[in-house]
Amino acid sequence: MAIVGYLIRRLLTGAIVVWVVATVTFFLFFARPVQTVARQLAGRAATPQVINEVINNLGLNDSIMTQYWHFLDNLLHGNLGFSYFTGVTVDQMLKQDLPPTVSLVLGATVLWLVFGLSVGIISATRARSVFDRVASVGVLVGLSMPTFVVGELLVGFVFQPLYSGGFHWINTGYAGITSGIGPFVGHMLLPWITLATVQAAIYTRLSRGQLLETLGEDYIRTARAKGLSERRVVFRHAVRAALTPVVSQLGVDIGQLLGGVVVVEQVFGLGGIGQTSIQAVGNDNLPVIIGFVIIAAVFVVLANIIVDLVYAALDPRVRIT
Amino acid sequence: MSILEEAGFDAQQAADNLESARSVQGRTQLQLTWRRLRNDPVSMIALAVIILMVIAAIAAPAVAALTHHAVDTAYPDTGEDASGNPVGPGVAGFLLGTDSTGRDLLVRVLYGARISLFVGVVSTLIAIVLGVSIGLIAGYFGGIIDTILARFTDAVLAFPFILLAIALATVFGPSLTLIMVLITFFSWAGIARIVRGQALSLKEKEYIEAARSLGAGPFRIMFIDILPNLLAPVLVVGTLLIPAAIVFESTLSFLGLGIQAPTPSWGNMLSDASNFYQVAWWYVVFPALFLLITTLAFNLLGDGIRDAMDPRTERLIAARRLRRRGKRKARAVTVQAQQPGK
């Protein structure tokens, strides 16, 4: 089976990528003196002995290579270490922080794909109509909006007035899906919109451009000439071909998406892995940072494999080898 | 007297003709682009907005002098109301109101423009120089250099930039230099990729072969013969990179990883403003508006340049004109056709 071999090869190269990312992060943080962590841990009025003891306990006095070896050994056993400050295992923190992040990413992705693609398709099939013009202005405004500005404006001019007006369904913070679908959506709606806005604009523009180009191809004329309905021409013949670059764009975007995730979690106080990693960076919590970076890298690698598979399924010319 | 001159051939004239033809050809692409761009009202408005923004940024100290409001000075007596909240636009000589500590918002927003424009333009320029050089070398020499570059650009494009930004900001401490290094690091790869692709196809052209047969070295060919043909696509990417850089800077500053208070930047002002939604809408709205207008103007201009460079645009405009004329004619015909029956 070609696909099994392909998957094995992709997973192996993916593992190498994750290892490189983890190693780079690990060594990057050794540019920072260990004193700061120990001093914070030992309290304000710490004597040098106490600080040294803390450093020894954390194993920060070993040579870099010894520490790196420990780190790799633990990593292979699926052990990501403990948070320096709370003593909670990083695995546990991940378990706690993943649900908000995953719901944010999945919901926003669905929202922007549905919105971006449908607006793009309508714009392309009715090029130069009023809808198309309004949409392309909207696309440019969306493209120019930094994610955090969208979030700030939504909090300031949608959430706050509604909340103080006694409408409490739309809320900030995170409510798990276990607390009911209503509260879940209410809490996630604004974050989804925030994360999806910029991306929806990119995908509208991309799908419109691609579809316009595809609709000009000879085989579309052939399809029309043999009497297919316009709906069938657009959806079966044109959209499928036009979607392939959109899917490959998705692969590139997933890495960049994390930036948006950090911002959105910060603005809405969702407490996902983005927010936690910013906090961890703030107090030099090395195991937590590395844990989150590894998870992010795994996520990016897996997403890219899925995207490539979808790509192959969409475009019959692409073969998995 | 040569036989040519006898036949009325003026060597000087011919040389002049050749010279002028050559000089026209050398600029054709950019000239054509500019001509098309000039006829596009949206691009011209965007350009005007950008120029105004640059002037405003340069004039920020002058505005500060005119309003007698220094950028980092709080004015608790005039700039805050009785309960210590910011005052609104137009109150007590504060055209855009004041911020959380009673500083003049207008002056601070203009100083923020200096940082945003500086970061956007300078880091884009550095990224262009880097990206063009690396892309040219990879595309021209090919082989192992090209493979290494391709893998490296892939890695850069796939790396979650925010993670590196966060990590570096904590290791080295947030600073303007760090922001610019980060932006450059994540921008050059895209340019290098485009330049490489173009260089790959251009180096097979006959005129490059001609240059080589005249004894031109690889660097002469790359920078004198190939580079001018790449200016147009690089110009478009550059114009679109500037707003991206501005957004990146403001996002980092918003997260507290970029420009640090009290130095004003649109990002850190918005971060501070988030605590004052209910009492001071202007504190959120004006920095956001300046940021949005600036990025929108650059995006519009970049789009305009891209359209203007596309030879298909000329045809599109012509086609639209034709269709309009056709419609008018058709209408005239129907009107005429209806009249006799009246």
Image: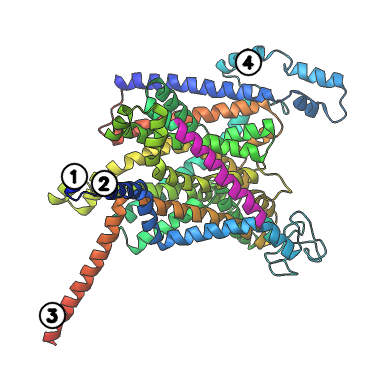
Which circle's residue, 3 or 1, is located before the other in the chain? Answer: 1
Q: Amino acid at mark 3?
A: Ala
Which residue is at 62% across, 12% downward?
Answer: A69
Numbered disc 4: secondary structure = helix
Same subunit: marks 2 and 4 = no
Labels 4 and 1 touching (C-beta < 8 A): no
Q: Chain of mark 2?
A: B
Which residue is at 73% across, 24% downward?
Answer: A33
Q: CA distance from mark 1 to mark 2?
A: 9 Å
Front residue of B120 and B38: B38
Numbered disc 2: secondary structure = helix
- Compared to residue A250, the image places residue A164 above or below, namely below
Same subunit: marks 2 and 3 = yes
Q: CA distance from mark 2 to mark 3?
A: 62 Å
Q: Amino acid at mark 2?
A: Ala
Labels 1 and 2 touching (C-beta < 8 A): yes
Q: Is residue B304 magenta?
A: no
Same subunit: marks 4 and 3 = no
Which circle's residue, 1 or 2, is located before the other in the chain? Answer: 1
Residue behind mark 2: B11
Q: Residue furthest front?
A: B1
Location of the C terminus of chain B by quadrant is bottom left
Residue behind mark 1: B4
Front residue of A243 and B307: B307
Q: CA distance from mark 4 to mark 1?
A: 82 Å
* Lateral position of residue B129 relative to residue A59, left or right: left
Residue behind mark 4: A68
Residue B337: mark in rendering: 3
Q: For the magenta stretch, what is the residue range? A: B110-134
